[in-house]
């Protein structure tokens, strides 16, 4: 299999219909359009973010699977009940007490992707406050054991994880990918580069808007358009990982006004992958990297 056949490049989520950061008029044309079908004309993968908030109805998931072409792969973000207990309680008013019912519920929700060969990987994203102390290692090990039937990628964002060589060993022993992230760096941040720990590589590009990272909202925090020089830098890392793994995913999460699909296409071009151009009109003031 060639290097390009192993590389899947897309965006974190495909539906951003409201707010200042909407994709309508920037990536999606105005008017009625099936967003997933339109998106899949240009990209071979997407990361599903809605599964983080609640397990979806399997019927919806079946419709996602049938709307994309052969060879398209989804990755699925794990339900926040397993990774963000504080956020889950704030959203629901309930403590995040995990039972087998929750595991079964989540597994059933994504079963159509498994059945039709559309599931690329499961992403367990932990918050920056999740540290390698107390119950942290047990929680990480529990998630790995519980979802071992899937290709699994884990996003660890606090430096206590990358400071401990035993963590890379744990991930390697279980063939779990340590997510390579690009985002603003602070003293508590995980190492800029973490080791490859699986036969799958998984990259997430959040943008570098340090000014708005802690004070911005879910839109302005990701208002960052990677420059051509930065895309070349990131593509070099992706190429290197592609040569050492059997499967690679790379997702842009700088979702403000369709910046993510623009930069995903930029990376596909830099990696010399086949590209289908899409029309996009963006006001001049948004051409500046924030």
Image: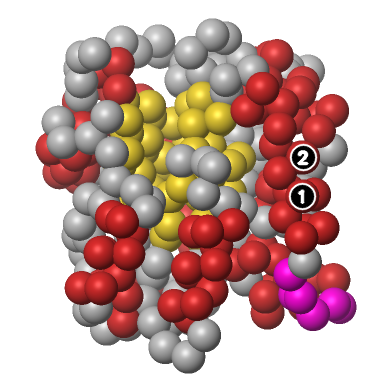
Q: Is residue 202 in view from this perspective?
A: yes
Q: Which residues are magenta?
A: 93-98
| Residue 143 percent across, percent down from the top left | 55, 62
Check if mark 1's residue and mark 2's residue have beta carbons within 8 Å. Answer: yes
Residue at 42% in and 60% down: 155
The residue furthest bottom is 134
Magenta region includes residue 249:
no
Magenta region includes residue 96:
yes
Residue at 22% in and 50% down: 196
Q: Which mark is residue 104?
A: 1
Depth check: give the residue in front, 173 or 22.
173
Question: From the viewer's perspective, is 96 left or right of 266?
Answer: right
Q: Quadrant of residue 200?
A: top left
Question: From the viewer's perspective, is 281 left or right of 88?
Answer: left
| Residue 112 percent across, percent down from the top left | 72, 26
Q: Which residue is mark 2?
A: 108
């Amino acid at each position: 299999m060639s290097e390009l056949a192993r590389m899947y490049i897309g965006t974190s989520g495909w539906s951003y219909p409201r707010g200042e950061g909407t994709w309508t008029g920037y990536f999606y044309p105005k008017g009625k359009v099936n967003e997933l079908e339109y998106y899949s004309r240009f990209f071979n993968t997407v990361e599903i973010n809605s599964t983080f908030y609640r397990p979806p109805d399997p019927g919806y998931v079946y419709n996602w699977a049938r709307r994309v072409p052969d060879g398209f792969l989804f990755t699925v973000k794990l339900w926040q009940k397993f990774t963000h207990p504080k956020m889950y309680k704030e959203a629901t008013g309930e403590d995040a007490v995990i039972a087998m019912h929750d595991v079964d519920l989540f597994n059933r929700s994504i079963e159509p992707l498994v059945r039709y060969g559309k599931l690329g990987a499961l992403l367990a994203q932990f918050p920056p406050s999740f540290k390698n102390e107390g119950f942290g290692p047990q929680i990480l090990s529990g998630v790995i054991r519980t979802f071992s039937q899937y290709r699994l990628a884990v996003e660890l964002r606090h430096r206590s994880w990358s400071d401990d060589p035993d963590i890379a060993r744990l991930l390697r022993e279980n063939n779990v990918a340590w997510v390579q992230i690009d985002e603003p760096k602070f003293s508590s941040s995980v190492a800029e580069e973490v080791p490859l720990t699986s036969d799958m590589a998984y990259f997430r590009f959040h943008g570098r808007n340090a000014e708005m990272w802690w004070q911005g909202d879910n839109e302005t925090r990701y208002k960052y358009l990677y420059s051509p020089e930065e895309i070349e830098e990131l593509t070099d890392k992706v190429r290197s990982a592609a040569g050492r793994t059997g499967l690679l995913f790379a997702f842009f999460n700088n979702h403000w006004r369709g910046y993510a699909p623009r930069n995903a296409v930029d990376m596909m071009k830099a990696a010399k992958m086949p590209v289908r151009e899409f029309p996009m009109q963006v006001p001049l003031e948004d051409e500046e990297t924030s």
